[in-house]
Image: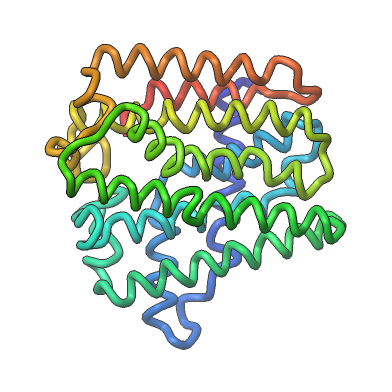
């Protein structure tokens, strides 16, 4: 199977499953369940859940065993998008080519939908742990890692520092790296490592995956900055130019330096995979797609 076909196979597996564990649209209360499904089912690259499946494969396990875990990662990602788009955050109009959740359902319902998605994610992780016979230590480790990735030492912390520095109107390169490795890198890391934690993988390959994902997350966010500065909304699928008045990797270093740095990070991410016992082909393809993407 070609790399592209393998990627598409895993993407279809996620698409078939991502709505499966969400509330049915007719379940009471209908409006909140409609908003939850709108936030998840309306498209997207599904990169993070595919990474979870690819990491499972790279460790030598059956990727299908971690489909619930993969969907949990996507629920967390969609939760973060709903919150990032709020008027008090980025005040975005468009996400994935259509109105953001708060514009379609109102701010209060959007916040509640994001809260519910996070809880659905943790439930799926627990269910997946039961599926594979994870003991208490492995289950607790997976829950701990996901909670840390989401909380004030991860995504929430990165978002807070981003808002804080934007209000101040100044930022240094070290703080910018902190923001970008937390806002994006934290969820990439838990996507790459949580399957192995639940399955009892040794620490050495998990550390290799952690290194891969952290570098990939930083590179991915730099590419996001490039797309915000140079992309078109109809191609990117969301508002562009939103970061023109705040510090990003592009505004600090320029587009050419940003592209060079992103390439170096993604090459380093690939080198982290050299000693894995399973098949890292899909993880390498993800790194390349992160660099060459247009949305």
User: Which image quadrant for residue 134?
Assistant: bottom right
Residue at figure coordinates x 54%, y 31% from the top left: 214
Q: Is residue 294 above or below residue 140?
A: above
| Residue 123 located left or right of residue 45 | right
Residue at figure coordinates x 49%, y 48% from the top left: 154
Measured as percent of width and height from the top left, residue 120 is found at 57, 68
User: Which image quadrant for residue 233?
Assistant: top left
Tell me if residue 72 can be seen.
Answer: no
Q: Residue furthest left?
A: 245
Q: Is residue 122 above or below residue 203?
A: below
Tell me if residue 87 can be seen.
Answer: yes
Quarter of the N terminus within the rendering = top right
Residue at figure coordinates x 20%, y 30% from the top left: 231
Q: Is residue 116 above or below residue 148?
A: below
User: Which image quadrant for residue 128?
Assistant: bottom right
Measured as percent of width and height from the top left, residue 270 is found at 59, 17
Q: How many marks?
A: 0
| Residue 189 located left or right of residue 127 | left
Measured as percent of width and height from the top left, residue 72 is found at 59, 56
Residue at figure coordinates x 76%, y 22% from the top left: 276
| Residue 284 located left or right of residue 62 | left
Quarter of the C terminus within the rendering = top left
| Residue 14 located left or right of residue 208 | left
Q: Nearer the viewer, residue 221 or 74?
A: 221
Q: Is residue 94 above or below residue 235?
A: below
Measured as percent of width and height from the top left, residue 179 is found at 38, 40
Q: How is the model colour-coded?
A: rainbow
């Amino acid at each position: 199977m070609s790399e592209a076909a393998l990627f598409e196979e895993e993407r279809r597996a996620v698409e078939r499953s991502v709505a499966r564990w969400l509330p049915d649209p007719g379940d009471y209360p209908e409006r909140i369940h409609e908003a939850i499904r709108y936030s998840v089912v309306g498209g997207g690259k599904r990169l993070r859940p595919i990474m979870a499946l690819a990491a499972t494969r790279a460790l030598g396990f059956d990727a299908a065993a971690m489909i619930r875990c993969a969907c949990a990662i996507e629920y967390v990602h969609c939760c973060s998008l709903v919150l990032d788009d709020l008027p008090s955050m980025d005040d975005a109009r468009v996400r994935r080519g259509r109105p953001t959740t708060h514009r379609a359902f109102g701010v209060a319902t959007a916040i509640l939908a994001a809260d519910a998605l996070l809880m659905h994610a943790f439930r799926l992780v627990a269910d997946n742990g039961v599926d594979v016979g994870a003991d208490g230590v492995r289950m607790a480790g997976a829950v701990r890692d996901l909670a840390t990735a989401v909380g004030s030492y991860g995504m929430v912390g990165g978002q807070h520092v981003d808002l804080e520095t934007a209000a101040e109107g100044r930022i240094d390169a070290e703080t910018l790296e902190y923001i970008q490795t937390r806002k994006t890198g934290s969820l990439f890391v838990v996507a790459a490592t949580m399957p192995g934690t639940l399955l009892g993988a040794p620490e050495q390959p998990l550390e290799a995956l952690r290194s891969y994902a952290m570098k990939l997350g930083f590179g991915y966010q730099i590419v996001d900055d490039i797309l915000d500065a140079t992309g078109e909304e109809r191609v990117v699928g969301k508002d562009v130019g939103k970061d023109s008045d705040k510090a990003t990797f592009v505004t600090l270093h320029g587009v050419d330096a940003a592209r060079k740095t992103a390439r170096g990070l993604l090459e380093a991410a690939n080198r982290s995979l050299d000693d894995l016992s399973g098949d890292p082909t899909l993880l390498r393809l993800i790194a390349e797609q992160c660099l060459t993407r247009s949305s």
